[in-house]
Amino acid sequence: MTIKKFFKSLSYMFSQFSVKTKIIWITLIILFGLYIIGKISVPPYDSSKFSSDSPSTSPKVEKPKKTDNSIMAWAMSHEFVRPMLKAPSTAKFGPFEESSVTPLGDEKYRIVAYVDSQNSFGAMLRTYYTCELKYQTDTEKWQMLKINFQK
């Protein structure tokens, strides 16, 4: 059987199929073609490249760098200041960009910022504060060391 006769008989057989069957066959042929292309183009998996026995190919694990907790210190200052206000629910703290956070070393931070809140007469007042906080790495909690309010 020559190739010409093969394709002629294949064409005749294919013409006898319903539209639904043709769609299924075409889909299968396309999927099979994609499978073959994938097998040809993707190199085989070489597990020796990822072996834990060879130290030269194992990835280096870096120790985590000490992070700057300035933004967290600023946010935590709100939690220490809020309960000291006459009307804590009315507190509106200034944005981080308008505050000053100074790392003092040893996980200590000095925060200078402001808060707008109501006084006992209901008037909104802006109060500036300076506080020093320390992050306790062993307990993962913040501690207030000092706080000072200025009108």
Image (cartoon, rainbow, N blue to C red):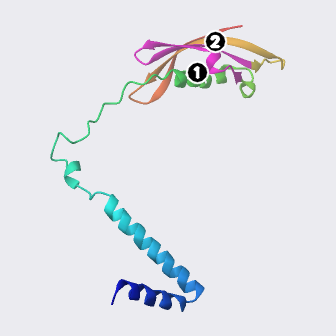
Which quarter of the figure has residue 85?
A: top right
Residue 99 percent across, percent down from the top left: 62, 15
Q: At 36% from the left edge and 84% from the top edge, which residue is drawn?
A: 3
The quarter in which the C terminus is drawn is top right
| Element on which disc 1 rests | helix
Residue 33 percent across, percent down from the top left: 41, 70
- Answer few, some or many: residues within 10 Å of disc 2's Cα (few below 14, many 20 plus, some between 14 and 19): some
Give left or right: position of 65 versus 94: left
Above or below — where is 73 with respect to 126? Answer: below
The quarter in which the N terminus is drawn is bottom left
* Magenta segment includes 135: no
The residue pinned by badge 2 equals 129
| Element on which disc 2 rests | strand
Give left or right: position of 34 versus 120: left
Q: At 34% from the left edge and 59% from the top edge, which residue is drawn?
A: 41
Front residue of this view, candidates 114 and 65:
65
Label 1 vs label 2: CA separation?
A: 9 Å
Which quarter of the figure has residue 148?
A: top right
Q: Earlier in the sequence, mark 1 or mark 2?
A: 1
- Numbered range of the magenta stretch: 92-116
Residue 137, which numbered label? none
Above or below — where is 37 with respect to 95? Answer: below
The residue pinned by badge 1 equals 77
Residue 113 percent across, percent down from the top left: 63, 14
Give left or right: position of 142 versus 80: left
Above or below — where is 9 with respect to 67? Answer: below
Q: At 46% from the left edge and 77% from the top edge, which residue is drawn?
A: 28
| Amino acid type shown at disc 2 | Tyr
Give left or right: position of 48 versus 103: left
Q: Main secondary structure of the magenta part?
A: strand
| Amino acid type shown at disc 1 | Ser
Q: Are marks 1 and 2 in contact (CB under 8 Å)?
A: yes
